[in-house]
Amino acid sequence: MAKDPASPGRIKQIRMIAQIIKKANPKGMPIVYASVVVVVALAVVLGLLTDSLIYTLPLGIPAALLVGMIIFGQLAQRAQYKMLHGQPGATYAILQGMRGNWYVEEKPVAVNREQDLVFRVVGYPGVILVSEGPGNRVQRMLVAEKKRVQRVAIDVPVYDVQCGDAEGQVPIAKLQRHLMKLPRNLKKPAVSEVNNRMRALTPSIPLPKGPMPKGARLPKMPKAPKAR
C-alpha cells in the first residue's frame, strides 16, 4: 500500500505545535495526555460495569483522541497569543487568522511616529478599523481613518476597535471573538464589493520598523479524528 505523503507533514506539525505549547505552558502537554487517558479509562470502566467493553472501547478511543485534539488546539491558540503579545503587528497576525469571509488589508492603513498602527478589515459587519497602541494616541488616527472610509463607503457601517490591555480596549486574545459578535449588516456579495472599494482607498504606507509577526501563526492544525 502506498504511503500517504501528507502523514510525515502532519506529524511534524504536531511536534512543532507541541514544542510551542511546552514552551508557553510546561503543564500543557501533560494535560492533553491526561485528557486522553481519562476518556479511555471512562470507556473501560463503563464497559466493565455494563459488560459491553467490546463496544465501549472502540468508541472510547476515537472519542479520547477527539477530546485530546480539542484541548491541544485550545492550548496552541493560547500559546500563539502569548507568543505574539507585545510584538509590533501582533494585531495583524491575529486578524489574518480569522476564518470565513473576512478581508484583512496586508499593510496598516495608518501609522504614526510611535509606530502605533491601524489595520482595516472588511466583513459581514462592514468596515472595521482595528488599532494597536495606547488609546490616547490611536484615537485620533481612528477618527481620521474613519472619515476617509466613510467618504468612499457612505452606506456601509464602520466600526473602530482598539486592541490592547488598557481599559476600554479589547485584549488580543479576545479580538477575533469580539469581531465575530458584531452585527452582520452585509450580504456576501456586498462584502466583496466593499472590499474592492476599500482597496482603491488604501494609501502607500511603509511598514513600521521592527518585527511584523506576519508569519507568527502556528502551523496548521491537523484534522481531529471523527468519533464513530
Image: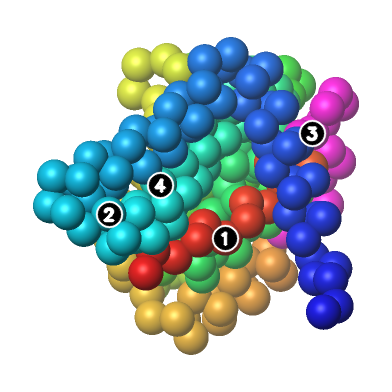
Q: How would you classify the magenta stretch by its main secondary structure?
A: loop
Going from N to C along the chain, the mark reached first, 1 or 4, is: 4
Q: Which residues are magenta?
A: 202-213
| Residue 201 visible in the displayed image | yes
Instruction: Report the amino acid beneath label 1.
Output: Lys
The residue positioned 12% from the left and 52% from the top of the image is: 50
Q: Position of residue 123 (x, y in %)?
A: 47, 65
Instruction: Report the amino acid beneath label 2.
Output: Leu
Compared with residue 159, is residue 164 higher up or lower down, i.e. above or below? above
Q: CA distance from mark 4 to mark 2?
A: 15 Å
User: Disc 2 marks which residue?
Assistant: 53
User: Disc 1 marks which residue?
Assistant: 223
- Which residue sits furthest left? 50
The residue positioned 44% from the left and 65% from the top of the image is: 226
The secondary element bearing badge 1 is classed as loop
Viewer-proximal residue, 198 or 79?
79
Q: Position of residue 190 (x, y in %)?
A: 46, 81
Q: Position of residue 79 (x, y in %)?
A: 58, 27
The residue positioned 55% from the left and 81% from the top of the image is: 193
User: Disc 4 marks which residue?
Assistant: 64
Q: Which mark is residue 48?
A: none
On whether residue 210 falls in the magenta region, the answer is yes
Circle 4 packing at 10 Å, graded few (<14), some (14-19), many (20+), is: many
Going from N to C along the chain, the mark reached first, 2 or 1, is: 2
Circle 3 packing at 10 Å, graded few (<14), some (14-19), many (20+), is: some
On whether residue 184 falls in the magenta region, the answer is no
Name the side, left or right, on which 25 lies relative to 165.
right
Q: Which mark is residue 212?
A: 3
The residue positioned 31% from the left and 67% from the top of the image is: 184
Q: CA distance from mark 1 to mark 4?
A: 14 Å
Q: CA distance from mark 2 to mark 3?
A: 53 Å
